[in-house]
Amino acid sequence: TGCPGTGMAFSRITVLDPPPRAISRGAAVMLGSLLTSLFLLHCLSDRCSRASPLKASLEDLRSQRTKRLLSGWDDPEPPSAGAAGGSARTQVPRESPGPSGRASPRFAGKLSPLGEGSKKLPQALIIGVKKGGTRALLEFLRVHPDIRAVGAEPHFFDRNYENGLEWYRELMPKTLEGQITMEKTPSYFVTREAPARISAMSRDTKLIVVVRDPVTRAISDYTQTLSKKPDIPSFESLTFKNRTTGLIDTSWSAVQIGIYAKHLDNWLQYFPMRQILFVSGERLISDPAGELGRVQDFLGLKRIITDKHFYFNQTKGFPCLKKAEGSSKPHCLGKTKGRTHPNIDPEVVQRLRDFYRPFNMKFYQMTGRFFGWDD
Ligand SMILES: Nc1ncnc2c1ncn2[C@@H]1O[C@H](COP(=O)(O)OS(=O)(=O)O)[C@@H](OP(=O)(O)O)[C@H]1O
């Protein structure tokens, strides 16, 4: 009646004369261990986690949320090819497949052939100004082998801050040692919270602001809105609080954004002037290589982008790249850059010039650069 005897008897019985119940128990044990081994093998090959329907649906939800957030970007210019910039050292296709296997038009980055490098938080940002020429500057900078940039506007420090720095870092292209990660979101310049938030990410962040005559900037801004909503009131009527008294409506964002001195004051509470570079939007058109030279110096990079990279496209009326980054073809910015502006009543333009003059003077004084908007 002892245990060993029972065991022997059991094993003998199962081999020689298995009763039906013993067979099914034995088979169940074998099947169970077989299935367990298979499952373990499956997990070792890293498939079990992906096979989990719960996890899959959580990931779907997460990526859907990110997609929703990203689709809210207001840059009307879809990144021309490949949303993230790349290195000239790594001549590979501009778009890399997203998690779905398809190239994501906005954030697809140009990876180095082995996908090496790591995603880092940006060390330099183009923070403004809206309609200043920020897209042109970013597209030109991306030609530099030591710059990698997100093409779309992440709007992290204004709209998406609650997503956290990890979310932000994930948007960045991979960089190798010595390469600078960049992004541009022109609304940062006028976002009250942006300086503190960027400083909290890193006090050493280099900031670039492309500025343009505030009057033409306002008209450009209005032209963009008009292209999306053709029914809006005229520029002239939006400019004034009261047309007869000539009181300018400073709460209209097209006017507000151009009061550069006021916005700059806010940045200077958090960043020293030496960490901010002002690029002339006008010179970026008339002498792109000159402005790019200043930017490369500011970023501590070798002056690789020179005159040789640009040609003036007569049809477009703007400088274009002889070879776009990662390509051998000439490249101009898209149709939404360099729009024809509507004619504005010259009296209204003059009234705006008078309005901006003192702010411009203050801005020249603060930056130590004369931008020549009030000649
Ligand atoms: N090389 C080149 N090609 C085309 N356009 C150029 C270029 N350099 C500067 N610009 C000027 O850029 C203006 C658009 O500015 P942004 O790119 O900052 O606009 S946005 O805030 O991102 O919407 C855009 O304004 P509009 O002319 O009003 O369309 C251009 O004047």
Image (spheres, helix red, strand yellow):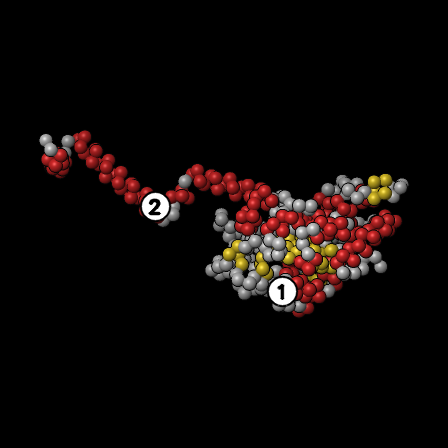
Q: Quadrant of the N terminus?
A: top left
Q: Percent x, y for residue 347? A: 88, 49
Q: Quadrant of the C terminus?
A: bottom right
Relative side of 241 to 339, left or right = right
Relative side of 316 to 34, left or right = right
For label 1, the residue is 300
Element assignment for label 2: helix
Look at 74% across and 62% down and name the residue there: 283
127 or 63, which is in the foreground?
A: 127
206 or 134, which is in the foreground?
A: 206
> Is residue 113 visible to the viewer in this orientation of the structure?
yes
Q: Name the residue type under label 2.
A: His
Element assignment for label 1: loop
For label 2, the residue is 42
Residue neighbourhood size for the residue with mark 2, other residues' Cα within 10 Å, grouped as few (<14), some (14–19), many (≥20): some
Q: Earlier in the sequence, mark 2 or mark 1?
A: 2
Q: Percent x, y for residue 308? A: 66, 69
Look at 81% across and 56% down and name the residue there: 361
Q: Which mark is residue 217?
A: none
> Is residue 135 visible to the viewer in this orientation of the structure?
no
Q: Is mark 2 within 8 Å of ligand 1?
A: no
Relative side of 155 to 339, left or right = left
Look at 71% across and 59% down and name the residue there: 279
Which residue is farthest bottom? Answer: 308
**How far apart, in angstroms, are the residues tagged by discs 2 and 1?**
50 Å
Residue neighbourhood size for the residue with mark 1, other residues' Cα within 10 Å, grouped as few (<14), some (14–19), many (≥20): few
Q: Does the residue labelled 1 lie within 8 Å of ligand 1?
A: no
